[in-house]
Image: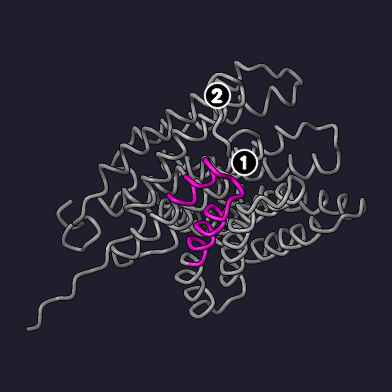
Amino acid sequence: MPPRKARLPFANAWFFPAAALYAALILPYSVLALLGLLPALPGLATSAGHAHEMLFGFALAVIAGYLLGPQPLRFTLTLLGCWALARLSFLQWPGSWLALASAAIFATGLAWKVLPRFLGAAKKWRNQSVAPVVAGLSLLSAIASGGFGAGFDRLMLEEALLLLATLMFFMGGRIIAPAVAGYAQSRGWRLDARVQPHIEGAVLILLGLALLLNLLPWPLTRQLTGAVLVAAAVLTTIRLLRWQPWRCARPELLTLLLGYAWLAVGLLLLGLGTLLPALPLNATLHALTVGALGSQTFAVMARTRLIYRFRDPAAQRWIQGVALLISLAALARVLPAVLSQPHPAWLLLAAGCWSLAFMALTLLLWRCRDAHSDSPRGNANH
């Protein structure tokens, strides 16, 4: 018989550790730089630079690792190198041609591999929605690296945050629904509300509408955007409650559900902050970025690699306790802002908790980055 063709390695074996390490080092560094405790790199001299690297540096690397799937190792490492060059050039020379070109090459490579999988294979429009979201994030990552002005960059960051919220809503639901259903079956009860297509479709439409309204400069559209986001938050909460999280006793499921709860809270605060300008921006944004994005990416990266390595997302239970540090970091950013009691100590607490959590995740991911673990034989050995 002819020899069996070797299976291509998964891109997340390289992108996930790189993203986690970047989150553990650069993002807390930018907080310390903004407080004047460390010299600021040119790209991190403002809060907009901090947000840029959170969304286009860290988050886009996680998206690449999760959606690329199996790829030739040469392509994965080349694309990872483009991502690293884009990060370095933005940190040192923001707005330069090198920052723009490297970000554009990375975005093009990501879109080239990911978009056909959802446009060609997916039949339902809800499944195809991943393609325009990834295309939009890829385009925004390139444009936002060009340094076209503070006002324009802020708009690009707002649009990117809404696109990430859309992706977190969709992909998070598609991970949680079967996971909770499988757990329910193993415990002898049935979960009837799984994907909940009507709620999923409604929220995707609402978030798409918010993306369009946010581009319009009129005061009325800002109020409409806030109302749309509040409605999306309510529906997200209903979807979460229908999964009956109080019946889930497995820590890895609770970590996923906690990240989804942060998404509902973040959408609600963002909507209320749009309707009520008195609500501090730090509270509305960090509930989505630190709370939702941090928790969901942490849970997905850990779960994905543990399944590939051990075929068991609960193989390393200690990592689920570490995930709580991210929620603590989010609370340290959100609550002081809401209570109008900002203090540098809260920023340091948030940065420390975030950094410790992602450093621990980096170690776990690197240990799971066995060259044989992505093959059927490698998984069977564990």
How is colour applied across the structure in the image? one colour
Label 1 is placed on what type of residue?
Ala
Q: Secondary structure at mark 2?
A: helix
Q: Quadrant of the N terminus?
A: bottom left
Q: Which residue is mark 1?
A: 51
In the foreground, 216 or 50:
50
Mark on residue 147?
none
Total marks in image:
2
Category of crowding for the residue at label 1, using alpha-carbon neighbours closer than 10 angstroms: few (below 14), some (14–19), many (at least 20): many
From the top left corner, tell me how far across and down residue 319 is, in percent: 37, 35
Q: Is residue 70 left or right of residue 50?
A: left
Residue shown at 60% from the left, 41% from the top: 289
Residue shown at 66% from the left, 40% from the top: 48
Residues shaded magenta? 84-108
From the top left corner, tell me how far across and down residue 62 is, in percent: 46, 51
Q: Which residue is mark 2?
A: 32
Q: Is residue 288 left or right of residue 281?
A: left
In the foreground, 101 or 236:
101
In the foreground, 293 or 242:
293
Q: Is residue 25 above or below residue 244?
A: above
Q: Main secondary structure of the magenta part?
A: helix
Q: Secondary structure at mark 1?
A: helix
Q: How far apart, in angstroms, are the residues tagged by discs 2 and 1?
A: 14 Å
Label 2 is placed on what type of residue?
Leu
From the top left corner, tell me how far across and down residue 110 is, in percent: 47, 64
From the top left corner, tell me how far across and down residue 124 is, in percent: 58, 76
